[in-house]
Image (tube, rainbow, N blue to C red):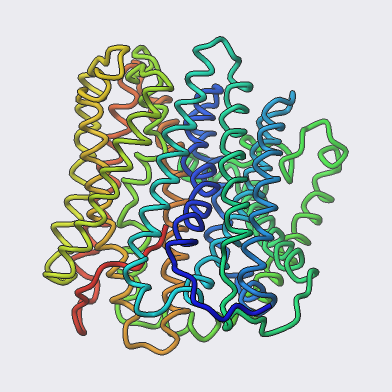
Amino acid sequence: MIQAAYVSPWLFVPVLYFAQGLPGMMVQGMTSPMLNDLGVENKDLAAFTALISWPWVLKMLWGPVVDLQGTKRSWIIGTQIAILFSIVASAFAMLTPGYLWLTLVSFFILAFLSATHDIAADGFYLLGVRPKDQSFFIGIRSACFRLATIFTTGYLVSLAGQSRGQGMSGQAAWAVAIGAGAVAYGVCLLWDTFNLPKPAEDVPVNPFKPSDLPLRFGQVVLTLAGIILAWRLLYWTLGPLISPMFGYVFPNPIEKFGTPLFLEKTSQYSVLSMPIQIVISIAIIVAGALCFKTLVEKVGLREPAKVFFSQEKIFWVLGFILFFRFGEVMIGTLTAPFLRDPVEKGGLSISLEQVGAISGTVGVVALTFGGILGGVVISKFGIKKCLWPMVLALNIPNLLYLWAAQSKPVIGPSMNEVWNSPVAGLIAFDQFGYGFGFSAYMVYLLFLVQGKPMSTSLYAIATGLMLLGANVSRLTSGLAFDFVKGRVPDATQHYFWFFAIVCLCTIPGMITLLFIPMKGEDIKEAPIDID
């Protein structure tokens, strides 16, 4: 039944975007402290975090299914039901003997469902909120997304820490935290089921075909499998040459992941002869390439891609997109391990509960304030004048991590000592700088596509490359830390030298600012909300 009356966005926007943020931050924000607490090495932690974040990079490939089939409202409710089951499954997976892989798999599925929910929610927003109200509620939805971040990386992480303090095992404590997230998400699902409006414009372009989504997802999985096996095949053929030269930048996947498709060495597939494994790998690589070609044609990215990659100074533009926040993402990946690891391993030996309080509360409040101020400053002065000050605001806080890794400030056990500690100030300053500087990044991506045909598709390409750069940065953080461990015998200095490498990794992004095109009309507006 089509709803005729306009429903106030206050009734549904806050809960809808809290529900968008919660599963996303469980995967991207809570995974790092969880894996660190469960004893996963930093190199593996970074690799796992990057791997399960890929659905957000690739969501444009199955976006048309959501856009053209079924109503946005039905997609929201349907994905929220599936997300709730996935969170519950993650909690139960944490209690099993093979908890690590089962939890990561369930988190990957959660990421796919969350990315699909993002597509539907953002499309619904344009239909359910009047154009004159959309700019105002951009700020409301962003604030509610940040509130979900505080709840997830603050409250849930602290809850796991409190459960640990009461004698629970790591697995049980994190199962409790994930279960609490499921309860909160269930409340959101109930609210949205009864309060999401039914805009007259929310009608399907094509009849819903349940087979299309698993087909599209299967094509994405085959594409990823092709990339992974191409990487492995490179080592099978050129391993002796590649390993000495690029071993820390492109780690040997045979040593890292064992047999093809991440199976154990005792599996039937692993005992096949090398020629047969190579033939199977080549077949999957070819299938993945064909799937990628089909996906690109289905989505209609061919023409926008030609426009995007033929623009002026594209080499420097790509360098800017990929490296602008490279160092900040590296630090964000290993911040929780740095805070948690004992002093003899170079960390600050802060409790899990305190990490939740610092990162999930102080950090997110500072991040939100920095983002708001960044939008205000850009709206007044324009992106051309703000780019250099904002990139410096993004990267200068990295130097404070060098200081913290060297001086190792002590934090007492009470929460008052946490709030007044220099570490809380460090996290606040870092996250404020990130929020402030990230505003310039997002507005420059708008600057690149303004006035061009197919600007929405061009912007999708730009943000996809942005997320690709973030994933590469997460992988690099683990490899860089492993590099330091292999060359610095004093474990107390591992994080110091890691942060030194991070500071060096910020330089390429800043160099690109000298060469990227800055012609055309300046943009003086707050960035589009991309969480």
Q: Is residue 296 something that shows in the picture?
A: no
- Residue 19 at x, y percent in the picture: 53, 52
Q: Is residue 16 left or right of residue 481?
A: right
Q: Residue 202 versus residue 457: which sits nearer the camera?
A: 202
Q: Residue 102 versus residue 481: which sits nearer the camera?
A: 102
Residue at the extreme front: 5
- Residue 148 at x, y percent in the picture: 45, 46
Quadrant in the rendering for residue 414: top left
Q: Is residue 300 left or right of residue 456?
A: right
- Residue 526 at x, y percent in the picture: 26, 68
Instruction: Identify the residue at image location x=60%, y=74%.
Output: 198
- Residue 362 at x, y percent in the picture: 29, 35
Q: How many marks?
A: 0
Instruction: Identify the residue at image location x=56%, y=38%.
Output: 181
Instruction: Identify the residue at image location x=53%, y=18%.
Output: 163
Give the quarter of the figure containing the N terminus: bottom right
Relative height, residue 140 to residue 474 (above, below): below
